Image: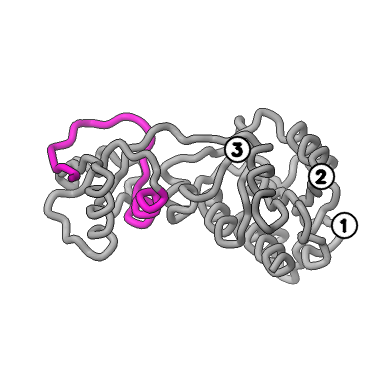
């Protein structure tokens, strides 16, 4: 059974928020301990969290709300924080090869310099819902799997594999060698996104907030797709663009 005790200051990676923690428990993630506000009212989500923690023999630490917020990295814990090991990243080839064991062609999402954890989380949530098999991010000048990203993903980052690579362009070349088509998103595209073919093995590349695709990444893409716009703004938020294109891929692949 899980056991309630007083918490000491914890160090390391956290998952925060009821939905994110619940999805981590459902996914069987490696959780070292849970920290909850003492005496908090147990609604449906918290009841399931406590039940799953008990089944997995995960220690539950009871603290004051002030103590919990001091341990929270997002400051939006909703009364519960899970302490977990550092994020596990996967080899990009494993994402594709793992996808080939299913009945759908591999669909990967590559993020070219996304720095906002909320964008990473939102893209992960849509990618998981649309059936993508993984996300590729760069090691430098980009956000990784943080507490904020996990919370923004509503737990999706517990279900979708993420690869962190040192060089996006070398990874693109390797994906091409493995038979994947690489389609980048940019305002100045070769075709509109609804005209691009997402039915086969494909990597969709999303550019950074404000800057879009970097020059070399754009040049290495097989095709550039654009999202038509008629308003005064020249681009959409990265996570919104990703959602539109991922669901076009989903539509084509059904």
Query: Mark 2 = which residue?
Result: 179
Quadrant in which residue 59 is drawn: top left
**Neighbour class for label 2 at 10 Å: few (<14), some, many (≥20)?**
few
Local SS, label 3: strand
Query: Mark 3 = which residue?
Result: 163
Residue 66 appearing in the image:
no
Looking at the rendered image, the disc whose residue lies closer to the viewer, 1 or 3, is 3
The span shown in magenta is: 1-27
Residue 70 among magenta residues? no
The quarter of the picture where the C terminus appears is bottom right
Mark 1 or mark 3, which has the lower sequence index? 3
Is 185 rendered above or below residue 3? below
Mark 2 or mark 3, which has the lower sequence index? 3
Quadrant in which residue 51 is drawn: bottom left
The quarter of the picture where the N terminus appears is top left
Residue at 60% over, 38% down: 163
Residue at 56% over, 44% down: 161
Query: Mark 1 = which residue?
Result: 190
């Amino acid at each position: 059974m899980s056991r309630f005790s007083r918490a000491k200051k914890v160090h390391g990676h956290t998952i925060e928020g009821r939905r994110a923690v619940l999805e981590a428990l459902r996914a069987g993630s490696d959780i070292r301990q849970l920290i909850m506000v003492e005496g908090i009212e147990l609604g449906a989500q918290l009841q399931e969290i406590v039940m799953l923690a008990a089944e997995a023999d995960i220690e539950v630490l009871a603290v004051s709300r002030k103590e919990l917020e001091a341990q929270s990295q997002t400051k939006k814990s909703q009364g519960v924080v899970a302490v977990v090991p550092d994020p596990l990243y996967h080899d990009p080839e494993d994402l594709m090869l793992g996808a080939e064991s299913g009945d759908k062609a591999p669909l990967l999402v590559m993020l070219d310099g996304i720095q906002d954890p909320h964008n990473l989380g939102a893209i992960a949530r849509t990618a998981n819902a649309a059936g993508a098999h993984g996300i590729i991010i760069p090691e430098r000048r980009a956000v990784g799997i943080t507490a904020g990203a996990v919370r923004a993903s509503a737990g999706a980052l517990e279900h979708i594999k993420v690869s962190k690579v040192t060089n996006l362009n070398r990874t693109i070349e390797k994906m091409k060698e493995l038979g994947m088509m690489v389609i980048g998103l940019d305002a100045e595209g070769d075709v509109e996104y609804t005209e691009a073919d997402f039915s086969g093995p494909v990597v969709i590349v999303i550019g950074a907030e404000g800057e879009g695709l970097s020059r070399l990444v754009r040049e290495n893409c097989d095709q550039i797709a654009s999202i038509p716009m008629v308003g005064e703004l020249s681009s959409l938020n990265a996570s919104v663009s990703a959602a539109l294109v991922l669901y076009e891929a989903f539509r084509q692949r059904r």
